[in-house]
Every structure is written in structure tokens, then in C-alpha cells.
Amino acid sequence: MFEPTRREFLIAGLAVAASSPSAFAQSKDLARLTLRQASELVRRKSASPVELTEACLARIDRHDKAINAFITVTRDEALKAAREREAEIRRGTNRGPLHGIPIALKDNIDTAGIRTTGGSALFKDRIPDHDAHAVARLKSAGAIVLGKLNLHEFALGGTSAVTYFGPVHNPWAIDHHPGGSSGGNAAAIAADLCFGSLGTDTGGSIRIPASYCGMVGVKPTAGRVSNRGVIPNSWSFDTVGPMGKTVEDVAIMLGVIAGYDDLDPTSVDVPVAEYARAMRARTSRIRVGIPRTPFYENVEREVMKAVDEALVVLRTIAGDVREVQLPASPGLGAVSNAEIYAYHAPWVTKTPDLYQDATRRIVLGGANAKVETYIEGRRRLELARREIAKAFESVDVVVTPTTTGVASLIPRQGSAPTSANPTATAGSTPTGPAGGGAPGFRNTSYFSYYGLPAISVPCGFTTAGLPIGLQIAGGPFAEATILALASAYEHATQWNKRRPKLGLGSSRSD
């Protein structure tokens, strides 16, 4: 058996080294550890996979009724897998840093024998026969799947309030949305319901909720992670990526799921770096670009203040910080609108009432897309993605606010976006679900169009206690570089150490 007193001692030690005293000083809740901390306890046999899983399930039971992050909790399957991973440890087998670590998956990522709904009544009883490629990689690395996470229906929006399973609530302020479309992912991590999660990002759907919930989220380079087994939003822009409590946590997950998949036509055969090691690289030679136009325009005052303070920190840890101008982005709409409709056409024409009203409007918005417009859009996209590397000849990364504002109140179903609630019906504009017409997606969709890697890390809070995110993006396949700078910034500021106080209905933190 694993020895409780020794485990508690190690938790306390990890807390001193890697967390604020208030987070763990009077708590022995294993679920509140980072993924890396939990992994270290498993490696030392000071906590078991079963104990970690039970800790997460207990927090889900205690808190998720108010947050609504999970659509499906795979309690029995998770505990069975945890016992199997624990038995492997007793036999001397450890598959790596994800061995025995409970994670959760966005519910548009297929899981064999477990329903995958896309957050829609249309697929509420859909049970795939196979795991998505990324899920199979996680399981092979020893990860334990806790369940499936709520999302903006079919990943077609930025609030996670438009979903058949009810809106997701932001743990920092329960009456606010967590962003989207991977809102359940960010909310679950912020509430310590899991140690990490897998989401999808088409125009900002990982980075926006990471920003709104004070978490870390990575959109990899297009083709870096296989999309096979994911309900598509837009094939040309969809990416699978990790979300977690720290940069190191997402680096560990990315290192597992990245790699070539010859059965996915969007996959690219490029060597995968050891991200967890690469993120420790020195940052003193990293050249940072600040693209003021349009990324710093019309940004809310408190967000701009936090980002300006972040730039001061970056100047102390990076080699050079300079102003740059990036090429314009045509927006995603010419391509994405047609692809959205192409996937949904068999259902939206026959059973339109199974879609939420806002989602149905988005899908039908692509019904009249012209073939020549789509083909020309695809041609321009391919050319742009080849040319974008030139923008990174003078800098290694660019830094922007992740979003122009912070999480707003949960919108009423079908309400129109306003300046205070810019993503209420994100995607209903002619530029598509992640295009320039939706203000919440402006800063993130640019890097989706060009297929570039980008990460959002916490960089502060508003006076009301709502999280603010900083976006760091790099050239094609520069994941290691953006992770290194993000990690250095994280350690210099430690914004990621703050956690919301749950059950208070307000944006207060530990």
C-alpha cells in the first residue's frame, strides 16, 4: 500500500517548491496539484493512480453541478484504468509522466464505447467505435480518461453557453461564461477537476477559454497533431491541443500527442521535439516582436495594462523586444463557411430542429458558398502558409493580448454580441465562426489562418478578479520556442498559482 503520511509530506514539499503557500498549506487535496507534481508522486510511489482518480472524481461530485464542465463522467472506466496503471507500477512498469494521470477530453474528440456528442442533441446518443488518434496516444502513455467535457455546440462559438447540455460556468465568476469553444476544458482545469485536458482550436477555441479561465492552452502548428477522430469544425483550420495548469503540464501532453499520422491527410511528417525538455532552454536569445496593428487596438483598459506589464517582464528575460508588422489575414470565412456546411449538410437539412438556433444559423450561413470562392480561398491559404515564415526572419515569436477583453456574463440564448459580450453569437458573421468579424476571435484567428503555433498564458487579473491572457506565437513548428518563453514568463510572474474559490458565486481567489 501507499503510505499516506509520506504522501502528505511530499505534497507539502511540492507545494513549497511550486505553489503559493495558501494553495496547499492546509489542504491535502491531490486534485489541486499540477500534472507534473502528481506525476512525480506517482513516480515515487507516494500517491497512486487510484488515489489521484478518486480525488478528481470527488471534486467533480462536489463542484461540477455548479460549473457544468462535464457532459459524461466515466467513473467506472476511469477507476478500472487507474487500477490497471497501479498494477503496472507494482510490476515495475511506468510508461512516463502521464502514467496514471487523470485527464479529460473535449466532447468532440472520439472515444471508443463512450458517447461523443459535440455538445448537440443531434449526437446525444452517438457512440464511436474507435478512439481519436490523439486519445489513443494519451492512453498508450498511461493517461486515465475521466470523462468528456462540455463545449459550444459543434465548436461553433466562443462562449460554451450554446450547448444542448446547458451552459458552462466560469469558476472565477459563476455567472460569467468561460469562453469557447473548449469552455468545459478550461473550467474543469481551473476548478481542479482534472490534471489536464485535450481540446480543439479552429480560430481560438483553446486559447480564448484558457485566457478567460486563467489557464494555459496551446494551439500547435497545423498538422503537428492528428485530427483523425475529431468531429470537424473546419478541416482547413482545426487543430487538437492540450490545456493545463502550467506550461510544463501542456508541454508534457503535447509531447505525447504530437506526431505524424499517415491516415490523416492534414498531418505533417516533421520531427517532434522533446517539449518538456526544450521548454527549459535559455530565453536570452529569443527575439520578440510586438505587432501593434491590429492586435493592440481596441483592447479593454485593464487587459492592456496587464499586457503592458507583461511586456516589461519579457524585456528582462528575452534577448530583444521590437515592434513588428505582420502581413494581413484575409480571415477564415471564405474557406471555413463552406467546410462547416459541407459536414453538416446531411443533418441540418433533414433535422434542423436538433441544432441550437445560433448554431443552425451559422451552419446554414455556408449553404450558398460558391465553389470558385472556396477554391480560390484554399489556394490563397496554401500560399499564405508558405509565405508566413518570412515574417519570422527578424523575430522568433510575437506577443499579443490573447483577447481584447475578459469573460462576460453568460448570454441569453440567441442574444446578439455587444461590446461587453463580443462572443455571444461568435460565428454568425459573414467571416465565419472564427473570423475577423467576431471581436473575441480577432487576435487568435490570425494565427489559425496561417497555421502557426500559439500559446495563451495567464498575465494578470482585472480588479473584479477575472483572468487575463497573454498570447505568444511563433513560426511554423516553433512549439519549443513559444513554450520556452511562456515557461520563463510563467516562472517570473507566477500568475498561474492563483485559483478560484468555488461555491462563492464571485470572482475571488485563493
Image: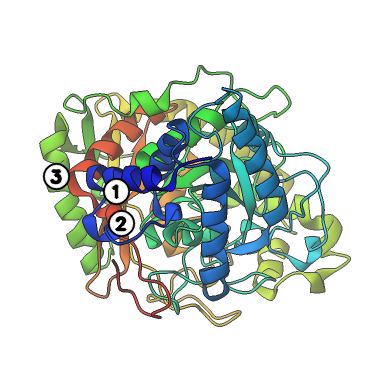
> Nearest the camera: 52 or 366?
52
Q: Is residue 31 left or right of residue 8?
A: right
Residue that carries the numbered disc 1 in the rendered image: 12
The residues tagged by marks 1 and 2 sit, at their Cα atoms, a distance apart of 7 Å
Q: Is residue 220 left or right of residue 392?
A: right
Disc 2 versus disc 3: nearer the observer: 2
Q: Residue 320's quadrant in the figure?
A: top left
Residue that carries the numbered disc 3 in the rendered image: 313
Q: Identify the residue shown where x is 21% and y is 25%.
A: 282
Mark 1: few/some/many CA within 10 Å (<14, 14-19, 20+): some
Q: Identify the residue shown where x is 44% and y is 21%.
A: 273
The vertical placement of 164 against 84, above or below, is below
Could you say where residue 392 lies in the image, as x and y percent from the top left? 32, 28
Total residue callouts:
3
Q: Is residue 293 left or right of residue 372?
A: left
The amino acid type of the residue labelled 3 equals Val
Mark sitting earlier along the chain (1/2): 1
Mark sitting earlier along the chain (1/3): 1
Could you say where residue 212 lies in the image, as x and y percent from the top left? 39, 62
The amino acid type of the residue labelled 2 equals Phe
The vertical placement of 129 against 208, above or below, is above
Q: Residue 164's quadrant in the figure?
A: bottom right
Q: Is residue 123 left or right of residue 54?
A: right
> Nearest the camera: 472 or 171?
171
Q: Which mark is residue 24?
A: 2
Q: Residue 497's quadrant in the figure?
A: bottom left
Element type at marker 2? helix
